[in-house]
Image (tube, rainbow, N blue to C red):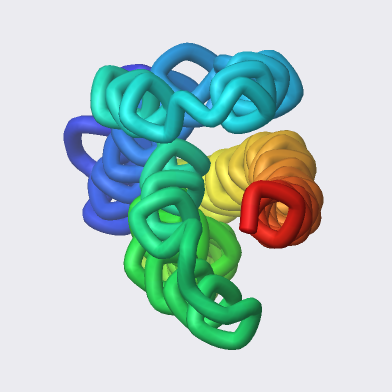
């Protein structure tokens, strides 16, 4: 099969599809498991600690120090900590819309790449069958046998290679999508809890102002 990969056009194309898929998978793993691997729960606890003590500047400083989608969402809420609930939630929505593409970058291409690998494998299979049937019209038995063997080999290798790539890409896609969905859920939950905490702090601030007044 190694010899055919460098000669058979649709095996070459599917090799390119495989390489593109690997680049996306590596990039997604690096981002979702390492770069964005920090738990939103840990960051939320730190931010809550600063918010409860009234240290909004330190909470913002912590968010600025982290390259994570949730830090941008928290930062949007903290910069409007003294605004109305509607304004805080609106700022979070805008920040989330900005950060979600970075969190989901490249993932959407994976199902399409799986389909492309399958289709090119199928086209290669048909090409192999055409070569096999063309051998029937060959002049002598030896030539017929050679073309038949070559065509069947091309057909089976294309089928095997295309389906293998498709299955591997889909498995990787399911793993990445699961991790991505988990991070999105953490961001949504963390943002909701932070808004509640900010509103509580606003309420406490008003009560203190009334007592002091």
- 3 left or right, relative to 129: left
Q: Of 171 and 130, which appears nearest the observer?
A: 171
Q: Quadrant of the N terminus?
A: top left
> What percent of the width, then of the height, locates residue 189?
80, 50
Compared with 60, 37 (above or below) is: above
Question: Residue at left 65%, top 48%?
Answer: 212
Question: Residue at left 47%, top 13%?
Answer: 34
Question: Residue at left 51%, top 68%?
Answer: 92
> What percent of the width, then of the height, locates residue 20?
29, 43
Question: Can residue 21 be spotted in the picture?
Answer: yes
> What percent of the width, then of the height, locates residue 6?
19, 32
Question: Can residue 131 be spotted in the picture?
Answer: no
> What percent of the width, then of the height, locates residue 139?
34, 66
Q: Quadrant of the C terminus?
A: bottom right
- 148 left or right, relative to 64: right
Q: Of 44 and 126, which appears nearest the observer?
A: 44
- 73 left or right, relative to 40: left
Q: Quadrant of residue 137?
A: bottom left
Q: Of 32 and 75, which appears nearest the observer?
A: 75
């Amino acid at each position: 099969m190694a010899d055919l990969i460098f000669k058979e056009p649709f095996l070459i194309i599917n090799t390119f599809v495989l390489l593109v898929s690997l680049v996306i998978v590596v990039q997604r793993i690096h981002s979702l498991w390492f770069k964005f691997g920090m738990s939103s729960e840990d960051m939320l606890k730190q931010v809550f600690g600063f918010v409860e003590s009234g240290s909004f500047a330190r909470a913002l400083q912590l968010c600025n120090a982290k390259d994570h989608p949730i830090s941008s969402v928290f930062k949007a809420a903290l910069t409007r900590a003294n605004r109305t609930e509607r304004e805080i939630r609106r700022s979070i929505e805008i920040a989330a819309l900005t950060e979600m593409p970075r969190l989901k970058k490249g993932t959407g291409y994976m199902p399409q790449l799986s389909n492309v690998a399958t289709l090119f494998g199928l086209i290669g299979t048909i090409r192999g069958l055409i070569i096999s049937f063309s051998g029937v019209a060959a002049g002598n038995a030896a030539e017929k046998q050679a073309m038949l063997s070559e065509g069947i080999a091309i057909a089976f290798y294309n089928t095997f290679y295309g389906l293998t790539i498709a299955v591997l890409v889909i498995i990787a896609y399911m793993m990445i999508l699961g991790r991505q969905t988990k991070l999105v859920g953490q961001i949504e939950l963390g943002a909701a809890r932070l808004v509640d905490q900010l509103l509580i702090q606003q309420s406490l601030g008003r009560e203190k102002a009334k007592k002091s007044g």
